[in-house]
Image: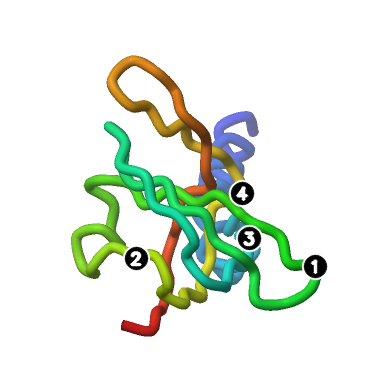
Amino acid sequence: MKLKIVVFLLLLAFAAPFSFPDAAFAAPGLSIGGTVLFQYVCNTGLLLYIKSATPPYAVMPLMWLWGELPFSKYIPPHPGQQILGVAAPTVVPCVLGYVPIGVGFPILFHGSSI
């Protein structure tokens, strides 16, 4: 009887991820969009400050991380460029040498105007 329960629970644990859509397990992302104002080079990537295109016109810090998928496939954003995409809801430090100079939300994916 105990073996049947253990087998049932193991099958349930392995089958559950395939029974639900992937969106149910995805972390919510932060929508980003606007004009790149500043760009700083760090040991961990590029720290970008984006001015949002819609009210309230806030400035949002973003991190373009070295070795991440967006960095390996696209040209890094530059000041004046418009970008639109999704960032992770956690912050990553921007370290220059040994000194942290800021934090930003890592870009998961984006589209841009070149």
Q: Mark 1: few, some, or many residues within 10 Å (few <14, many ≥20)?
A: few
- Residue hosting label 4: 89
Residue 11 on image: x %, y %: 52, 50
Q: Position of residue 62 (x, y in %)?
A: 50, 51
Instruction: Give above or below for 110 relative to 62.
Output: below
Q: Are marks 3 and 1 in contact (CB under 8 Å)?
A: no
Give the side of residue 61 with respect to residue 45, left or right: right
Dot 4 or dot 1: first in sequence order is 1
Query: In what element is the residue under mark 2?
Result: loop
For marks 3 and 1, the one nearer the N-term is 3
- What residue is shown at x 64% (from left), y 33% (from top)? 1
Report helix, strand or loop for mark 4: loop
First of labels 4, 2 by sequence position: 2
- For this orientation, the residue located farthest to the top is 98
Crowd class of label 2 (few under 14; some 14 to 19; many from 20; radius 10 Å): many
Q: Are marks 3 and 2 in contact (CB under 8 Å)?
A: no
Which residue corresponds to mark 1?
Answer: 56
Asked where in the image residue 6 lies, by quadrant, the reply is top right
How many residues crowd around disc 3 within 10 Å: few (fewer than 14), some, or many (20 or more)? Answer: some
Residue name at image x 45 percent, y 57 percent: 107
> Would you say 93 lies left or right of 26 here?
left
Mark positioned earlier in the residue sequence (4 or 3): 3
